[in-house]
């Protein structure tokens, strides 16, 4: 399942680059993938310098029209959600926290670790990585995974119909999506009265 978190990280990093880009600058935006990290560099109209975390961030869209457009098409949820999401996805994907560095050039750095698999950590096996990078998942499927995980609240239970309404999908397809997220979502009850909640 690591490929899901990888693509969700890509999604959020690219959206952040477009929403917060300082378009009057000639600085070339970069998205670089190396063996041990991936990062973006982007021209920025800085409101300060230093490291940004979910605890100290102050949401400030540099391009509110682009941000609004992304929200309308489902690519962005709300102000500040990108930082929180990348912190969450990075832990699932690499076991480490990302870095957000504020300055005239804004940087997002996400660690990569090919020997880490959240699936195996959950199952008590930290030595062998699950390698499924060749598996292709459509953008629409990634978007649906994202919607499900962000819709669910800790300690709350949901029916299949709740997710069908959220995604505007039939129960059969919705169940396939939920099955792919079993590392994060648990089933409660039998088929007739089955509910779902975050682990």
Image (cartoon, rainbow, N blue to C red):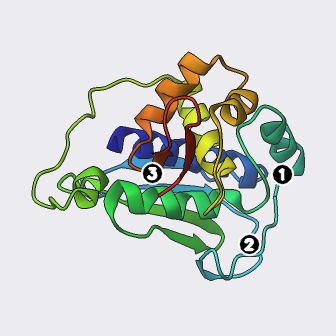
Q: Are marks 1 and 2 in contact (CB under 8 Å)?
A: no
Can you identify the residue that label 1 sits on? 63
Sequence-wise, the earlier of marks 1 and 2 is 2
Sequence-wise, the earlier of marks 3 and 2 is 2
Instruction: Report the residue at 57% width, 25% height from top.
Output: 174
In front: 121, or 86? 121
Q: Is residue 173 above or below residue 3?
A: above
SS assignment at label 1: loop
Can you identify the residue that label 2 sits on? 46
Residue 120 found in image quarter = bottom left
The numbered dot on residue 30 is none
- Crowdedness near tag 1: few (<14), some (14–19) or many (≥20) residues, C-alpha within 10 Å: some
Residue 57 found in image quarter = bottom right
* Percent position of residue 168, x then y: 73, 22
Instruction: Report the residue at 70% width, 38% height from top.
Output: 75
* CA distance for labels 1 and 2: 13 Å
Q: Quadrant of the N terminus?
A: top left
* Percent position of residue 106, x then y: 61, 65
* CA distance for labels 3 and 2: 36 Å
Q: Are marks 3 and 2 in contact (CB under 8 Å)?
A: no
In front: 189, or 46? 189
SS assignment at label 2: loop
Instruction: Report the residue at 16% width, 61% height from top.
Output: 126
Residue 197 visible in this rendered orientation of the protein: yes
Can you identify the residue that label 3 sits on? 184
SS assignment at label 3: loop
Query: Which of the two discs, 1 and 3, sits closer to the camera?
Result: 3
Instruction: Report the residue at 17% width, 49% height from top.
Output: 129
Q: In the picture provided, is 108 more to the left or to the right than 159?
A: left
Q: In the picture provided, is 6 more to the left or to the right than 21?
A: left
Q: In the picture provided, is 96 more to the left or to the right than 152?
A: left
């Amino acid at each position: 399942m690591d490929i899901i978190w990888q693509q969700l990280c890509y999604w959020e990093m690219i959206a952040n680059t477009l929403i917060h880009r300082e378009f009057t600058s000639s600085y070339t935006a970069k998205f670089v993938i190396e063996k041990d990290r991936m990062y973006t560099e982007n021209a920025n109209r800085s409101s300060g310098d230093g490291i940004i975390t979910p605890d100290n961030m102050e949401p400030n869209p540099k391009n509110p029209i682009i941000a609004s457009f992304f929200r309308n098409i489902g690519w962005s949820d709300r102000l500040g959600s990108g930082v929180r999401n990348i912190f969450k996805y990075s832990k699932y994907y690499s076991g480490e926290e990302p870095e957000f560095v504020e300055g005239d050039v804004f940087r997002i750095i996400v660690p990569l670790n090919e020997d880490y698999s959240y699936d195996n950590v959950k199952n008590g096996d930290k030595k062998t990585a699950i390698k499924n990078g060749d598996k292709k998942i459509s953008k629409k499927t990634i978007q649906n995974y994202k919607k499900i995980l962000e819709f669910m609240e800790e300690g709350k239970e949901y029916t299949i119909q709740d997710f069908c309404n959220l995604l505007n999908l039939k129960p059969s397809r919705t169940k396939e999506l939920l099955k792919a997220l079993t590392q994060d979502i648990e089933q409660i009850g039998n088929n007739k009265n089955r509910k779902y909640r975050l682990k």
